[in-house]
Image (cartoon, rainbow, N blue to C red):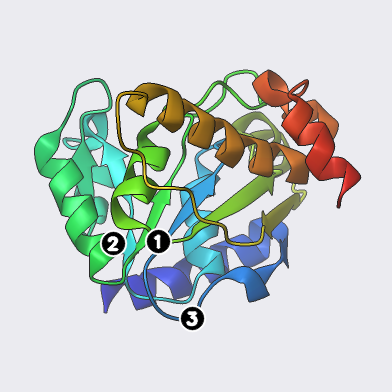
Amino acid sequence: MFQKYFRVFIKVVLFFIARVKIIGYENVPASGGFILAANHLGRLDSAMLYYAIDRQDVIMPVAEKYKDHWLFGPLVIALGGFFINRFDADMHAIREVLKRIKKGGIFVIAPEGTRSKTEALQEAHSGVAYFASKTGVPIIPVAITGTEDRLVVANLKHFRRSQITVRAGVPFTITPVKGVQHDEALQAATDEIMCQIAAMLPEKYRGFYANYPRVQELLANA
């Protein structure tokens, strides 16, 4: 229930501080489990995903450093979230994510692991590919622009609304990762996920993946 009220609050706040454009919403399933993998530019990214997705079963792990924060700590708990240690194999959190996905939840993850200091894509971790391989659910790549903290703060200071775009791509699945080439397969799947995101972003946001041949292939076929 709290997610419902929080979503209303987010929509009211964003109405005053931003113009939000949602593209590809038809690619987001109305039911069933899936993984939503997005780039991470700023603090508004999480709010944008609550703004765009009208479902109550969002799974969003949050970095453990926010656990004792006076605002974010209680808010995460109220939203049904949980904290995860990003630097170690947090088996409790991993099991919790797998359980919720298999029950039909939406797992929201930023493969880069943290906000990009360069405001462009960073090299991603393989966690998203791991969860996709373990559950077999579809992955929806999401490209977000306009949520950079620097730009949002500058616009607020000048009483301007930020221009934010959230673009959802076509769902796809990856082959379950097995065998001796486990790490290589996870890396290949991670690269595919990030290339899908990069191809939906303007050139200046593609960062680490800008020169990947797969990105150029996706752009050519768009």
The numbered mark, 2 or 3, whose residue comes first in the sequence reads: 3
Disc sitting over residue 101 in the figure: 2
Is 21 displayed left or right of 179 in the figure? Answer: right
The residue tagged 1 is 137
The residue tagged 3 is 30
Residue type at numbered disc 3: Ala
Label 3 with label 1: CB-CB less than 8 Å:
no
Is 168 displayed left or right of 188 in the figure? Answer: right
Residue type at numbered disc 2: Ile
Label 2 with label 1: CB-CB less than 8 Å:
yes
Name the residue: 20% across, 49% down.
82
Disc sitting over residue 113 in the figure: none
Is 33 displayed left or right of 169 in the figure? Answer: left
Residue type at numbered disc 1: Val
Q: Quadrant of the N terminus?
A: bottom left
How many neighbours does mark 3 have within 10 angstroms: few (below 14), some (14-19), or many (20 or more)? few
